[in-house]
Image (tube, rainbow, N blue to C red):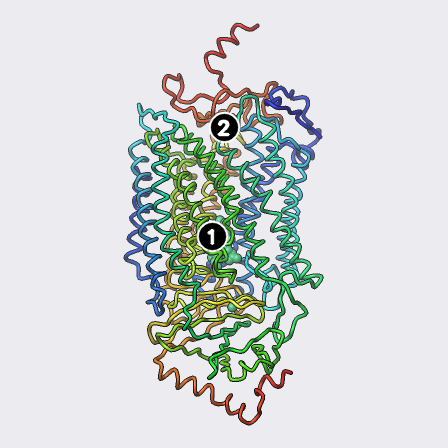
């Protein structure tokens, strides 16, 4: 009896906790509401199954508990029931997987109009690079890194000459514009994670990874590192500021100006020149 | 060394007791023992000991998470060393060793009607090599710089670079210990597989074996195929660390200088690790599945429902689990098109898994349920396993995994499904088979208290933890720190979880006490206290002596699940009880 009650308590307690507790995901700030929707579908399907299994167990434990005269039935199999359950399970699984794969398809296919932004991780800070007026990021590699060229821009790549490098400060993004984030690490694995954006991806030394998103509301959001990267891992934070196009342009201009100025005085790019 | 001469058709049934190597001294009986049952106990005690260490480590971790900064000696370095050692110990040195080395050794020969494992000498070596691996692992606590803090996944480049604790000695000892463990396991694993295939008693067809044997057998086959991937990964990483090769190391700029590495791939290690790591989850789960099926059937006095489907489900899960590994790598930067494939295979595995759950609960249906301690643990296993299995559908469904990956949601999920659930089965199994091993029952009152605290407590630890992950709290943070992302009340939740963890941990010492106390004071049990049908309960003596069966190995006439057969005299029929026709025939023979 007690056991049956406890099974019911666990089932219903979990449901109540789910609906009543204050702990839930932060309000979304990107186009990935599809992900939230898929999670919600999954919550519903799995929640129903969980409660059903537990209540069924509770019923059995109560109804078929050992009492004098209670004899168990002998029924090795029931093919029809087993196949029926298998098919129902298959349908439930498909109901979760299908939307999931459709959303994944969107997640990995970047819209053509997305602008690129590079995010570079190193123990334990974030750096960013945005394309200059040419709209293109220059190539880069860990092998070019020196103290003067901290994220390893290719000194010979003309596309990189006008790039904006932001180190140890905020990344600004314009609201409503798709961004393709190109991720790079110079030392160990990291992971760029802004809970409000839902998206995340590892930064892997030796390769460039990516994901894309469209910020959908303005505000300031915290960047967390979500892949163990050594003792500084929880401290590896940054900020993303999503703002209206005008404010963004203002910020970008402020970032850009000193670099351009340098370019005017010295024909080759300031920093990279020294790494040759 | 002894061997049981074998042939097709279960020749082992004719093996005479005298052909076994019998120990002549205390040392060969209890230390360098060749009796699988003694080896089983050696394995189990060492694994339980490691488990207690890992449990205490988890207390320290929880203390830090619940009360960050209060315990000054748990700084970031220490925290990472704790999670790494806790995770690796629990998964490999506790669960794998206990299920295969412990339960496998004890139960396989007894359940299939053999006198011993087929290679007793190799079996002995297996334990001692395992013990050596444990010593090496524990030695890293005392090495300069302490144990590695790379996380139990040991991902390079981080694992062998500055910025990670234990990157000098700790990681080397960890890798060496794993290599030694795998060598030891391989010796044991070959034994388990060959004994099941070759050592069965006459009449014990594969489709008459108890599901416990099916689970352990399939898990052993999987482990033999999966561990080599880890072996290779560990050897290559050792080379990268000690010889300066670059298997996993690309060009790196670390702590202000260019390193001499170049050309390697960190992702390669992840593929090798998870090619082992995912099957590993099922290496732990399948024996638990098997054991729990038997516990439920015995204590519900009912045949396991859908036996054939259960066997095929075990095999299907075992096979499928080799093609799902990259679901641990959805956000690793691997080719994103892999996501389609691995999400599909992963969700397909849910189907045979669900079948198992249905058949467990359908076994309860119209049963005659005795809620003894082993049964309670079995029921609690279903609850936590279903919970953890269902959250697996979140993490397996590639795009849903994106926000949740590497958060506390994952920690909650895998603790439910491969931490708590298998541990509950281990407890249930110990309460169940203890009388066979010792001749005495474990104390039932202590057992029930232990059960309720452990089950409800563990659920209280890990169920709310999912919601920390939904809020976006990453895993492997030694403190959440101030954040604009999550509310301050998240800290209260952490305190609650820590208190629950301390209580659950303390309850385990009650269990240890019960184990020791009942050995001398427990109620004496006869050879078959639960009225179970499988062979291990039919031994002429309890505890069974070396050789198990006395002069004659049993002959098997039926499956292991004849409970409450209509018309039968008792509510169970042992596997070696001949059907009436055979009895009549034997009556005529001299
Ligand atoms: C009451 C028992 C347990 C408690 C309180 C506990 C607690 C914890 C905590 C706090 C973490 C670190 C989470 C983080 O910061 O990322 C952790 C990690 C882990 N635990 Fe447990 N644990 C328990 C039992 C188990 C068991 C039985 C297993 C067996 C599978 C297990 C396997 C792991 C693994 C694999 C990790 C991951 C380590 C890593 O991130 O590298 N734990 N546990
Ligand atoms: Cu990081």
Residue lying at the far bottom of the rendered structure:
A265
Q: Is residue B494 visible?
A: no
In the image, is B119 to the left or to the right of B307?
right
Q: Which mark is residue B472?
A: none
Q: Position of residue A90 (x, y in %)?
A: 37, 44
Q: Which mark is residue B207?
A: 2
Residue corresponding to mark 1: B341
Check disc 1 and report its element: helix, strand or loop. helix
Check disc 2 and report its element: helix, strand or loop. helix
Which of marks 2 and 1 precedes in the sequence? Answer: 2
Q: Quadrant of the N terminus of chain B?
A: top right
- Kindly indicate the quadrant of the structure image that contains residue B162: bottom right
Is there CB contact under 8 Å for labels 1 and 2? no
Q: Position of residue B71 (x, y in %)?
A: 49, 64
Rendered residue at 54%/53% (across/down): B274
The 10 Å Cα crowd at callout 1, few under 14, some 14 to 19, many 20 or more, is some
Q: Position of residue B446 (x, y in %)?
A: 43, 39
User: In this view of the protein, which residue sits in the foreground, B533 or A1?
Assistant: B533
User: In this view of the protein, which residue sits in the foreground, B346 or A179?
Assistant: A179
Distance from label 1 to label 2 (Cα)? 33 Å
Rendered residue at 54%/50% (across/down): B277
In the image, is B367 to the left or to the right of B176?
left
Q: Is residue B321 visible?
A: yes
Q: Position of residue B80 (x, y in %)?
A: 54, 62
Vertical position of residue B410 compared to residue B77: above or below: above
User: In this view of the protein, which residue sits in the foreground, B260 or B175?
Assistant: B260
Rendered residue at 31%/55% (across/down): A18
Determine the chain carrying the residue at label 2: B
């Amino acid at each position: 009896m007690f056991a049956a009650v406890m099974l019911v308590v666990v089932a219903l307690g979990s449901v109540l906790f789910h609906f009543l507790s204050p702990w839930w995901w932060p309000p979304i700030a990107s186009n990935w509401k599809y992900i939230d929707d898929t999670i919600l579908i999954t919550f519903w399907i799995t929640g129903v199954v969980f409660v059903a299994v537990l209540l069924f167990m509770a019923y059995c434990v109560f109804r078929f508990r050992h009492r004098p005269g209670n004899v168990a039935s002998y029924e090795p199999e029931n093919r029809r029931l087993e196949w029926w359950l298998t098919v129902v399970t298959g349908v439930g699984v498909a109901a979760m997987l299908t939307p999931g794969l459709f959303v994944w398809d969107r997640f990995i296919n970047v819209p053509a109009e997305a602008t690129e932004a590079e995010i570079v991780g190193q123990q334990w800070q974030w750096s960013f690079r945005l394309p200059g007026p040419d709209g293109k990021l220059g190539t880069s590699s860990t092998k070019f890194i020196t103290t003067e060229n901290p994220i390893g821009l290719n000194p010979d790549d003309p596309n990189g000459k006008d790039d904006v490098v932001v180190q140890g400060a905020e990344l600004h993004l314009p609201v409503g514009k798709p961004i393709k984030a190109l991720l790079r690490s110079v030392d160990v694995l990291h992971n760029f994670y802004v809970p409000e954006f839902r998206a995340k991806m590892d930064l892997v030394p030796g390769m460039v990874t990516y994901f894309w998103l469209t910020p959908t509301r303005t505000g300031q959001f915290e960047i967390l590192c979500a892949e163990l990267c050594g003792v500084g891992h929880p401290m590896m934070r940054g900020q993303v500021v999503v703002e209206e196009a005008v404010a963004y342009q203002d910020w970008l201009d402020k970032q850009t100006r000193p670099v351009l100025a340098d370019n005017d005085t010295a024909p080759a790019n300031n920093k990279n020149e020294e790494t040759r | 060394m002894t061997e049981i001469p074998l042939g097709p058709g279960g020749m082992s049934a004719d093996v005479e007791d005298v052909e076994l190597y019998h120990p002549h001294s205390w040392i060969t009986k209890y230390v360098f023992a060749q009796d699988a049952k003694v080896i089983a106990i050696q394995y189990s005690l060492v694994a339980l000991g490691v488990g207690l260490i890992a449990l205490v480590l988890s207390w320290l971790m929880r203390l830090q998470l619940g009360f960050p900064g209060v315990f000054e000696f748990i700084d970031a370095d220490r925290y990472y060393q704790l999670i790494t050692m806790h995770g690796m110990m629990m998964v490999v040195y506790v669960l794998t060793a206990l299920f295969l080395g412990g339960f496998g050794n004890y139960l396989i020969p007894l359940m299939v009607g053999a006198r011993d494992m087929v290679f007793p000498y190799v079996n002995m070596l297996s334990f001692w090599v395992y013990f050596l691996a444990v010593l090496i692992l524990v030695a890293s606590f005392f090495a300069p710089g302490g144990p590695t803090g790379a996380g139990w996944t040991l991902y390079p480049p981080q694992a062998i670079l500055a910025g990670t604790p234990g990157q000098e000695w700790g990681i080397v000892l960890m890798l060496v210990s794993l290599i030694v463990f795998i060598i030891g396991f391989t010796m044991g694993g070959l034994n388990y597989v060959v004994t099941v295939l070759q050592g069965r008693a006459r009449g014990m067809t594969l489709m008459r074996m108890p599901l416990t044997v099916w689970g352990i057998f399939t898990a052993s086959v999987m482990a033999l195929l999966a561990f080599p991937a880890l072996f290779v990964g560990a050897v290559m990483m050792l080379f990268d660390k000690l010889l300066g090769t670059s298997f996993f190391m690309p060009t790196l700029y670390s702590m202000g200088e260019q390193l001499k590495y170049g050309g390697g791939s960190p992702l390669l290690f992840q593929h090798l690790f998870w090619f082992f790591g995912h099957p590993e989850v099922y290496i732990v789960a399948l024996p638990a599945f098997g054991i729990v099926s038997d516990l439920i059937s015995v204590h519900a006095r009912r045949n396991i429902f859908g036996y054939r489907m259960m066997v095929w489900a075990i095999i299907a899960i075992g096979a499928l689990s080799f093609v799902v590994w990259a679901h641990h790598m959805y956000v690793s930067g691997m080719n994103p098109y892999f996501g389609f494939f691995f999400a599909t295979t992963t969700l397909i595995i849910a189907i045979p898994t669900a079948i198992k759950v249905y058949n467990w609960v359908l076994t309860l249906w119209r049963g005659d349920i005795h809620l003894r301690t082993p049964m309670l643990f079995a029921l609690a296993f279903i609850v936590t396993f279903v919970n953890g299995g269902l959250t697996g559908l979140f993490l397996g469904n590639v795009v849903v995994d994106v926000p949740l990956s590497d958060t506390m949601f994952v920690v909650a999920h895998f603790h439910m499904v491969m931490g708590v659930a298998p541990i509950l089965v281990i407890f249930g199994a110990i309460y169940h088979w203890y009388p066979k091993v010792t001749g005495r029952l474990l104390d039932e009152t202590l057992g029930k208290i232990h059960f309720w605290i452990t089950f409800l407590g563990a659920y209280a630890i890990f169920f709310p933890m999912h919601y920390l992950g939904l809020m976006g709290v990453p895993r492997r943070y030694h403190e959440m720190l101030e954040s604009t992302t999550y509310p301050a009340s998240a800290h209260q939740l952490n305190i609650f979880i820590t208190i629950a963890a301390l209580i659950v941990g303390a309850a385990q010492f009650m269990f240890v006490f019960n184990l020791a106390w009942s050995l001398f004071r427990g109620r004496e049990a006869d050879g078959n206290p639960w009225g179970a049908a499988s062979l291990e309960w039919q031994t002429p003596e309890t505890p069974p002596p070396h050789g198990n069966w006395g002069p004659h190995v049993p002959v098997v006439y039926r499956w292991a699940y004849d409970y409450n057969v209509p018309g039968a005299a008792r509510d169970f029929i042992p596997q070696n009880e001949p059907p009436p026709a055979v009895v009549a025939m034997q009556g005529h023979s001299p």
